[in-house]
Image: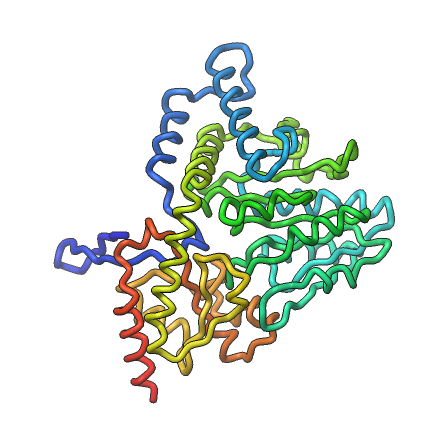
Amino acid sequence: MTYKLAEAQQGWWIAVVAYLDVAATTRVDPRVADVVLHWMTEDFGNAGSRTHEYGLRAKRAVQEAREFLASTVGAKAKDLIFTSGATESNNIALLGLAAYGEESGRRHIITSAIEHKAVIEPLLHLQSRGFEVDFLEPGPSGRISKEAVLERLRPDTLLVSLMHVNNETGVIQPVAELAEELRKTQTYLHVDAAQGYAKVPQDLKAPIDMISISGHKIGAPKGVGALVVRRRGWDKVPLQPIMFGGGQERKLRPGTLPVPLIMGLLEAAKIFHAEHARWERQARAMREELLTALSRTRFRINGDADHSVPHILNVSFDGQDAERLIVRLKDQVAVATGSACTSASYTPSHVLTAMGLPEEVATNGLRFSWFPSEASSFDAEQLAKTIAEIQAEAL
């Protein structure tokens, strides 16, 4: 990706920086942007306005989006509500079950210590309200085992919340296997699929009770996502709204629907679905290219490489401070130390710490994440050469 950078008193000059931070956000696909613009400037009606054709067209478009997006996870259109993104979806799923948990006396929740803060912080809030939350630690693999979760199940376990793909390590969690087991119990399963949606599609077709989806991880705009809430037979997940004011979206999420963003999410999901095989093949090839180039450096991979998505790689380089390394590499690649929500805090990664990794590793994990289409300027050999030189300087 190309950036124009201003240099004092020297006009404008061009610096080519490879964007390797798609786990934080993706560029809006130009095809998606065209769709969003259309629904902003031409078919701009309110989907709640049913007295004229502008509103009816918007309503029909939203229904089309609802049907397609639900189908991508094997759900029905009525199971999907639109939200502003995975953070809001997580909050509705977790906090929305609180009243039922209190009424039924089921106040035990199982989760992992490597969840995104959009899950951890709502659960800490529930903990302050008297819920008991087990935060499972995965060990060095970064993967929570199905058995570890099932061992903690109790008659009063209300919910298990486990992410699909870890946002820092790219490790895939066994959510599909877990869903099959939990369907035999009264315990609900919530999956934060912000990083995995559309990339590991088959997992999410398992009988997961609630799935959180985010648009801006797959080339859609920021500010749109969804929550899938499946029934168990005739029984609904007993969610209560956490916001009020209009009753839109099955009375779980009020507010005027952002039709342009929803249509952007639909277009991005269609594109990803159609191009998934090529994306996966190219992402995996880029991973191999990067690992081959990095073999000239001293590094370790953080997380189970055999159970990871092809486009996220978390590594620590021997003897190197990750923040300083990012500064040295900023003219070549845009990378991060972890979650975009916490990357400015300069503290050890809570994910790598929960994996039991040494402090010098947990503090210095560097996350590379890419879509091949956004990394055409990436030069793996030059990157590895620069890192090797920096490591040699430290000796």
Colour theme: rainbow
What's the residue at 48%, 11% (across, down)?
A: 53
Q: Name the foreground residue: 344 vs 1.
A: 1
Pinpoint residue 387: horizontal percent, then vertical percent.
Answer: 32, 75
What's the residue at 63%, 38% (across, down)?
A: 228
Pinpoint residue 345: horizontal percent, then vertical percent.
Answer: 49, 66
Q: Is residue 56 left or right of residue 252?
A: left
Query: Residue reaching furthest bottom?
Result: 395
The answer to whether residue 43 is above or below residue 343 is above
Q: How many marks?
A: 0
The answer to whether residue 253 is above or below residue 50 is below
What's the residue at 85%, 44% (across, down)?
A: 103
Q: Quadrant of residue 359?
A: bottom right
Pinpoint residue 105: horizontal percent, then vertical percent.
Answer: 87, 50
Image quadrant in which the C terminus is located = bottom left
Q: Is residue 258 left or right of residue 109?
A: left
Q: Is residue 30 left or right of residue 190?
A: left
What's the residue at 37%, 25% (across, down)?
A: 38
